[in-house]
Amino acid sequence: MSKVFQKPVKIRIRENSIRYRLSRSEVDAFAKEGHIENKTDFGFADFVYGIQVLDGIDSLAATYIGNKLTLFVPLTMQKEWTSTDKVGFDSIMNTGPGKTLSLLLEKDWACIDKSDEDQSDNFENPVSS
């Protein structure tokens, strides 16, 4: 079972682009567990989303099966991302003839504008220092 976070992994889906943003504690859990999963309860069904390490691949990949969106991260990428200051990775996944899906995984930085959102677990924004 994946750890459930009070402030779940952020995802942004726009057309053929998916962006995952993780806080410090989520990156730490991903480093230790190799996966993180959260869900949104729509009453009639849950939308489940998460990230998972997958050895044997060389770039980000994603699946959407049975109301579950999973971003797969190569093991070497997971180790580099969780143990360094590297902000993120991106990939373009082919989804069919002439079709692609843009994938982005990044650390969630604190906003520099005034936000009501609790950002205490976000990474320090380099612009604010």
Image: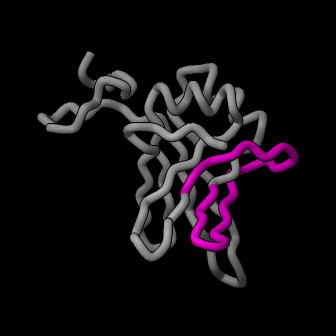
Q: Is residue 107 above or below residue 16?
A: above
Horizontal placement of 15 versus 51: left or right?
left
Horizontal placement of 88 versus 55: left or right?
left
Q: Is residue 78 above or below residue 42?
A: above
Q: In the picture, residue 129 is in which quadrant? A: top left
Write the residue at 67% across / 71% down: 65
Q: In x, y percent, where is residue 17?
A: 49, 64
Write the residue at 39% across / 25% down: 123
How has the structure been colored for display?
one colour
Quarter of the picture holding the N terminus: top right
Q: In x, y percent, where is residue 116?
A: 15, 38
The extreme bottom residue here reads 97
Q: How many marks?
A: 0
The extreme front residue here reads 43
Question: Does residue 46 belong to the magenta stretch?
Answer: no
Camera-side residue: 125 or 115? 115
Question: Does residue 53 belong to the magenta stretch?
Answer: yes
Horizontal placement of 129 versus 54: left or right?
left
Q: In x, y percent, where is residue 90?
A: 58, 49
Write the residue at 15% across / 35% down: 113
The extreme left residue here reads 114
Q: In the picture, residue 64 is in which quadrant? A: bottom right
Q: Which residues are magenta?
A: 49-70
Q: In the picture, residue 124 is in which quadrant? A: top left
Write the residue at 12% across / 34% down: 114
Horizontal placement of 53 versus 30: left or right?
right
Q: In x, y percent, where is residue 99?
A: 63, 79
The extreme top residue here reads 129
